[in-house]
């Protein structure tokens, strides 16, 4: 790839990253404020019920997908008039079938998941998300391939705002788990409307096996990994729920949601990198440079956020969310470790997908699924629901296998590019730990301590980084503003 094209691609990637980052910052603020309100309005049992029925619907969404959307983004020779219409036809047929199955089998699913009968109707309503995911796929494919992230950010922001607004209002009205269900369905409908208007693609039903087969080969391997992830996550709504109850599921779901908030930056990077790195997969040196740069930029945000949440978890939970959630603090801290190690590994997973190695990712997911179930079977009876968080943290250390697999294909180095954020993050987290232990006693002191730790992190990053790295960061900003102008 010629340097001018490479520079243009880097600038467009940066712009896409910043647009998504701006949306995620807004969404993050809304999610934090909304999460605090919901934590004070609803009990852990309600969070647990929603997590369990959400797992059932997630199975339907994943089985009805086949990874066709990701396969179409990864392909450079996409013909929207052919492949996209065929993929949409296959997806909508599968999604409608899975949605209908969930509606019909809802009583049996609720009984199998150990829930009360009054969870049947919320599950049936939430099943609408399955066909809605099929309608979302073609528009998202076109927008992502064109790196048109403005429309996607508007849709995602509207989704986040509406979900929390509807859920909070319904919770105030005493609607319990229906609060989450109504919020999820209405939010997805609003976001779907925005992306359809932006993509200008309209439903076309076509069927031609020759157009579907190429994307299906990549898609089934890609979606196989997603299915294994669901099987791995099934530990909580099945095994943990059976041993520790629905409240334990609520604690784990809430702790994971809070601890994994910093992973939004990984999600943003993944969305932007997938179409970008896919265009570099035939140029290993440039592919490696782009991946290493992504690792560094992600670590700059992910590491301090997760480390500060880990060390400040006790006062944050007690003062912000309330005493009912204090039992989840140990799980929250362990999930923070998972976020740090697993988030780094996830960037490498995206790189493997861009290289077309969905088959290898599938094998990794199979290994991780077996290990998580094995660790959970050992630790949950011993530690209670916290045992699952401990199993998750232990499992994240196997991310080294992802790095080893990627290095066999492209010369990517990990530690040199995450060293500075890691060292500065650990030092600022230690400062926060001392302040949280000996000084924090109310919201004001908590905020001041957090600001002091963040300032210390920024100062340390500037102090221990070299001139070349700072110049590279400045170049990124210059390219970003050049594209915007």
Image (spheres, rainbow, N blue to C red):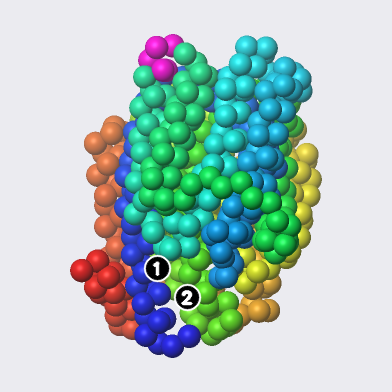
The numbered disc on residue 293 is: none
Residue at numbered disc 1:
13
Please check the rendered image and state whether residue 205 is part of the magenta-colored stretch, yes or no: no
**The one of 478 and 407 positioned closer to us in this rendering:** 478
Q: Residue at x 41, y 17 (%)?
A: 170
Left-right relation of 90 to 142: right
Give the image quarter of residue 351. Answer: bottom right
Q: Main secondary structure of the magenta part?
A: helix
User: Which mark identifies residue 290?
Assistant: 2
Residue 9 left/right relative to 449 = right
Residue at the bottom extreme, as displayed: 2
Q: Nearer the viewer, residue 232 or 309?
A: 232
Where is residue 293? Give x, y as percent: 44, 73
Relative height, residue 426 to residue 321 (above, below):
below
Query: Which quadrant holds the C terminus?
Result: bottom left
Q: Nearer the viewer, residue 56 or 95?
A: 95
Residue 294 drawn at (x, y percent):
46, 69
Residue at the image point whose x is 43% and y is 45% from the top: 196
Task: Give SS at disc 1.
Answer: helix
* Residue 332 coordinates in the image, percent (x, y): 52, 40
> Percent from the top left, x then y, of residue 347?
54, 63
Residue 170 visible in the current orientation? yes
Q: Are marks 1 and 2 in contact (CB under 8 Å)?
A: yes
Between 222 and 472, the residue placed more toward the observer is 222
Q: Looking at the image, is mark 1 or mark 2 earlier in the sequence? A: 1
Secondary structure beneath label 2: helix
| Range shown magenta | 170-174
Q: Is residue 320 above or below residue 125?
A: below
């Amino acid at each position: 790839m010629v340097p001018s094209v490479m520079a243009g691609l880097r600038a467009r990637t940066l712009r896409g990253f910043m647009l998504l980052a701006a949306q995620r910052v807004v969404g993050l603020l809304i999610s934090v404020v909304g999460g605090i309100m919901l934590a004070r309005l609803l009990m852990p049992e309600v969070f647990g019920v929603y997590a369990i029925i959400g797992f059932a619907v997630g199975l339907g969404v994943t089985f009805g997908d086949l990874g066709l959307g990701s396969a179409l983004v990864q392909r450079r020779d996409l013909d929207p008039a052919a492949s996209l219409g065929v993929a949409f036809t296959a997806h909508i047929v599968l999604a409608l079938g899975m949605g209908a199955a969930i509606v019909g089998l809802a009583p049996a699913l609720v009984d199998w998941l150990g829930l009360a009968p009054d969870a049947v109707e919320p599950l049936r309503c939430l099943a609408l998300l399955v066909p809605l995911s099929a309608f979302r796929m073609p528009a998202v494919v076109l927008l992502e391939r064109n790196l048109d992230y403005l429309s996607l950010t508007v849709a995602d922001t509207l989704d986040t705002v509406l979900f929390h607004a509807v859920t909070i209002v319904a919770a105030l009205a005493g609607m319990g788990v229906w609060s989450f269900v109504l919020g999820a369905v209405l939010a997805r409908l609003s976001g779907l409307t925005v992306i359809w208007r932006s993509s200008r693609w309209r439903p076309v039903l076509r069927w031609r096996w020759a157009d579907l087969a190429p994307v299906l080969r990549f898609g089934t391997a890609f979606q196989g990994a997603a299915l294994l992830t669901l099987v791995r996550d099934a530990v909580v709504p099945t095994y943990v729920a059976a041993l520790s109850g629905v409240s334990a599921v609520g604690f784990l779901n809430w702790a994971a949601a809070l601890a994994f908030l910093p992973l939004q930056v990984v999600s943003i990077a993944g969305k932007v990198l997938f179409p970008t790195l896919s265009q570099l997969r035939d140029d290993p040196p440039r592919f490696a440079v782009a991946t290493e740069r992504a690792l560094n930029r992600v670590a700059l945000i992910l590491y301090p956020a997760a480390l500060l949440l880990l060390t400040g978890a006790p006062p944050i939970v007690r003062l912000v969310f309330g005493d009912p959630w204090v039992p989840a603090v140990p799980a929250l801290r362990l999930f923070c470790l998972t976020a740090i190690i697993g988030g780094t590994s996830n960037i490498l997973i995206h790189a493997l997908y861009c290289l077309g190695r969905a088959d290898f990712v599938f094998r990794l997911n199979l290994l991780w699924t077996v290990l998580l179930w094995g660790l959970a079977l050992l630790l949950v009876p011993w530690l209670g629901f916290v045992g699952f968080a401990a199993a998750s943290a232990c499992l994240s250390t196997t991310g080294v296998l992802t790095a080893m697999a990627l290095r066999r294909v492209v010369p990517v180095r990990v530690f040199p590019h995450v060293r500075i954020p890691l060292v500065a993050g650990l030092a600022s987290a230690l400062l926060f730990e001392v302040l949280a232990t000996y000084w924090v006693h109310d919201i004001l002191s908590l905020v001041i301590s957090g600001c002091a730790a963040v300032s210390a992190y920024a100062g340390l990053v500037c102090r221990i980084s070299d001139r070349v790295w700072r110049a590279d960061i400045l170049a990124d900003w210059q390219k970003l503003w050049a594209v915007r102008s």
